[in-house]
């Protein structure tokens, strides 16, 4: 440990045998980035992939930390937004990494939100048949979800995340103070994934979120509160445990898709635009999953489902299809998108359903006709 490594950080380990790695969580931990990398890969060259927004707010601190630890770094700054998870931008990133003579033993650093994590992680997976990389997530969504677990991808004209690889980072450094400059709407959208961990498998965490969400949003502005860091750590621990059990999503990891079948369809129907952010879509998707589990499947009481939805609404997240701004979505459009997202086996769909808050399970036999009837009701609520 050097002087720049703060002691009030939390470390969550992702246990994957020889590919295990630490997630370092805390306010100000980006200052320790260089020292931590130097400890793991002495003398490595580093190559930072980031976007224009993150470059403006955060890149100087990351570069300063690397320089202080005596590490050389080069960088590429790509445009912000989902459009950068594309073949043309991937090509630019790969060529820049190669031009910078980053070789085996050196490191790629993904500095940004989920877009940068997915793009830089995939570039690292394919350049020279695999380079090591470090995730420095700068959005709440990336800190609690996308930077952990090794899924990397770019988008195809046929859909999102269709070209990618499983490639685990060697370190994740999640500095909660970076979220102070994140737009509120992005923060709130990322919070949907935090709430997801409570809703899918941890009722006590969900109850804690109900009581403490204001401190999580306030972050360092709340006097002496470490609610935000706690929420990130619990979320990472939950994801790490699931990933350790099922790295390639053949079983349990599917639980992380709570709210995502409905959510992806809504997101796609809105063209993956600012009209509906991923986390906002997942919030509506989780509300629908609870509602569907209660009213159509009789798995959970309506009161329990209402409690789940109430919390999402309390933080300002959308929970109903009619909360989506713009022209109404149609039933056929949503059903087509759901069918594309999940393969249908003899008219049956796989959904993550719930028996209660903290009790999600994988249901492989959901009748398409039921889903259609349910969504038709929800669309009529307009
Ligand atoms: N690999 C996975 O397991 C996984 C999981 C979930 C989502 N994802 C992917 O993550 C992506 C979404 O990630 P996201 O929500 O982080 O979006 P994002 O990366 O587009 O970031 C959102 C916006 O915030 C800006 N930004 C980032 N950090 C900032 C900061 N600290 N201050 C100010 N502005 C900042 C970005 O420039 C961007 O404009 C999607 O492409 C999704 O497919 C991947
Ligand atoms: Zn998600």
Image (cartoon, rainbow, N blue to C red):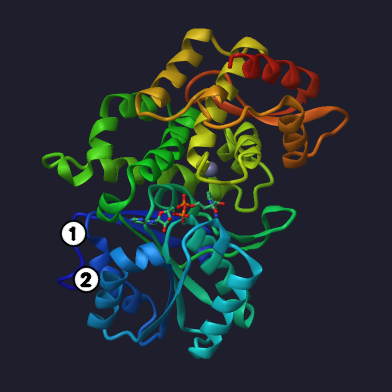
Residue contact at pointers 1 and 2, CB within 8 angstroms:
yes
Q: Position of residue 20 (x, y in %)?
A: 48, 62
Q: Is residue 55 left or right of residue 69?
A: right
Secondary structure beneath label 1? loop
Seen from the viewer's position, the closer of residues 35 and 223 is 223
Q: Which residue is mark 2?
A: 1
Residue 330 visible in the displayed image: yes
Q: Is residue 102 left or right of residue 39?
A: right
Q: Position of residue 252 (x, y in %)?
A: 61, 40
The residue depicted at 22 percent of the width and 54 percent of the height is 27
Residue 125 visible in the displayed image: no
Seen from the viewer's position, the closer of residues 51 and 3 is 51
Seen from the viewer's position, the closer of residues 86 and 361 is 86
Above or below, 32 against 359 in this view is below
Seen from the viewer's position, the closer of residues 15 and 189 is 189
Q: Which mark is on residue 226?
A: none
Quadrant placement of the C terminus? top right
- Name the quadrant containing residue 377: top right
First in residue order: circle 1 vs circle 2: 2
Q: Is residue 111 left or right of residue 117?
A: left
Above or below, 282 against 248 in this view is above
Q: Which residue is mark 1?
A: 7
Q: Residues within 10 Å of mark 2 (few under 14, many from 20)?
A: few
The residue depicted at 54 percent of the width and 61 percent of the height is 118
Q: Position of residue 38 (x, y in %)?
A: 32, 79
Q: What whole-number distance in Å separates the C-alpha atoms at marks 1 and 2?
A: 9 Å
The residue depicted at 57 percent of the width and 33 percent of the height is 258
Q: Residues within 10 Å of mark 1 (few under 14, many from 20)?
A: few
Above or below, 275 against 297 in this view is below
- In the orientation shown, which residue stands out farthest toward the left? 223
């Amino acid at each position: 440990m050097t002087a720049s490594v703060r002691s009030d950080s939390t470390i969550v380990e992702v246990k994957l045998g020889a590919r295990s790695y630490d997630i370092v969580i805390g306010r100000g931990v980006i200052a320790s980035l260089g020292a931590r990398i130097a400890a793991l890969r002495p003398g490595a060259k580093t190559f930072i992939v980031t976007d224009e927004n993150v470059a403006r707010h955060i890149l100087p601190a990351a570069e300063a930390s690397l320089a202080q630890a005596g590490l050389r770094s080069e960088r590429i700054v790509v445009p912000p937004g989902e459009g950068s998870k594309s073949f043309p931008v991937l090509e630019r990133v790969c060529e820049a990494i190669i031009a910078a003579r980053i070789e085996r033993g050196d490191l790629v650093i993904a500095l940004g939100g989920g877009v940068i994590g997915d793009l830089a992680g995939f570039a690292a997976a394919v350049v020279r048949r695999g380079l090591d990389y470090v995730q420095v997530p700068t959005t709440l969504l990336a800190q609690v979800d996308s930077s952990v677990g090794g899924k990397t991808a770019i988008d195809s004209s046929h859909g999102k995340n269709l070209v990618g690889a499983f490639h685990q980072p060697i370190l994740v450094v999640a500095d909660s103070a970076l979220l102070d400059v994140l737009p509120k709407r992005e923060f709130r959208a990322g919070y949907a994934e935090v709430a997801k961990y409570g809703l899918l498998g941890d009722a006590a965490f969900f109850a804690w979120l109900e009581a403490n969400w204001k401190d999580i949003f306030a972050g360092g502005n709340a006097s002496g509160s470490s609610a935000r860091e706690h929420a990130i750590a619990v979320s990472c621990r939950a994801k790490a445990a699931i990933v350790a059990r099922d790295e390639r999503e053949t079983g349990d990891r599917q639980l992380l898709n709570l709210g995502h079948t409905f959510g992806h369809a809504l997101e796609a129907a809105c063209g993956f635009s600012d009209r509906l952010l991923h986390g906002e879509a997942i919030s509506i998707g989780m509300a629908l999953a609870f509602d569907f589990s209660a009213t159509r499947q009789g798995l959970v009481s309506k009161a329990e489902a209402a409690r789940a939805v109430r919390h999402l609404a309390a933080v300002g997240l959308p929970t109903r299809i009619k909360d989506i701004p713009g022209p109404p979505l149609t039933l056929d459009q949503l059903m087509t998108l759901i069918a594309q997202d999940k393969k249908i086996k003899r008219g049956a769909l796989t959904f993550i359903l719930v028996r209660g808050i903290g009790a999600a399970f994988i249901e492989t036999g959901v009748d398409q006709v039921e889903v259609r009837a349910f969504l038709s009701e929800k669309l009529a609520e307009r």
